[in-house]
Image (cartoon, rainbow, N blue to C red):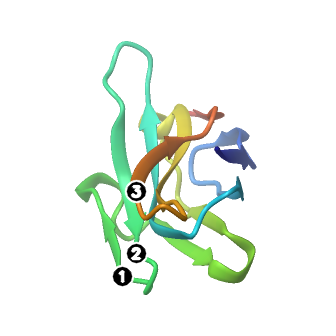
Amino acid sequence: QVQLVESGGGLVRAGGSLRLSCAASGSMFSINTMGWGRQAPGKQRELVATITEGGTTSYVDGVKGRFTISRDNAKNTAYLQMNNLKPEDTAVYYCNAQVTAYSRSKSVYWGQGTQVTVSA
């Protein structure tokens, strides 16, 4: 079983910054793609940023140029640096990881989420 634990959420004013962290632990052969999703009240969860094991990143249009995803493979940790935050970024942010088990089966895991609130 794999656990993902997020940290770093909080309350910030518009224009401010936050950095989220996601630490993966448990039995796994490797972590493939990691990502960050978010879910605002009354809306579906959306994946806003992903990063492959090799470091290739992708972003949803609404966060390009403001959010940066990175990872430390040695620490099984992913980060999301969020700058110039806007009230519409308010949501619960979830870490996501595609993991290969020692059996070579692949599974997707989600963390428990961390609240990010941006005030106007």
Residue at image coords 54%, 65% = 102
Residue lying farthest to the front in this orientation: 103
Residue 75: x and y in percent read 74, 74
Residue 64: x and y in percent read 33, 65
The residue lying toward the viewer, choosing from 81 and 113, is 113
Find residue 113 and report its image quarter. top right
Find residue 56 and name its label. 1
Horizontal side, residue 116 vs residue 34: left or right: right
Q: Is residue 3 above or below residue 15?
A: above
Q: Is residue 88 above or below residue 32?
A: above
Is mark 1 in CB contact (under 8 Å) with mark 2? Answer: yes
Find residue 52 and name its label. 2
Circle 2: residue type: Thr
Find residue 23 and report its image quarter. bottom right
Residue 45: x and y in percent read 36, 31
Q: Earlier in the sequence, mark 2 or mark 3?
A: 2
Residue at image coords 71%, 82% = 74
Nearer to us: label 2 or label 3: 3
Where disc 1 sits, the SS reads loop
Residue at image coords 43%, 64% = 104
Circle 3: residue type: Ser
Find residue 105 and name its label. 3
**Could you tell me which quadrant the N terminus lies in?**
top right
Query: Distance from label 1 to label 3 (Cα)?
Result: 22 Å
The residue lying toward the viewer, choosing from 108 and 92, is 108
Q: Is residue 106 above or below residue 71?
A: above
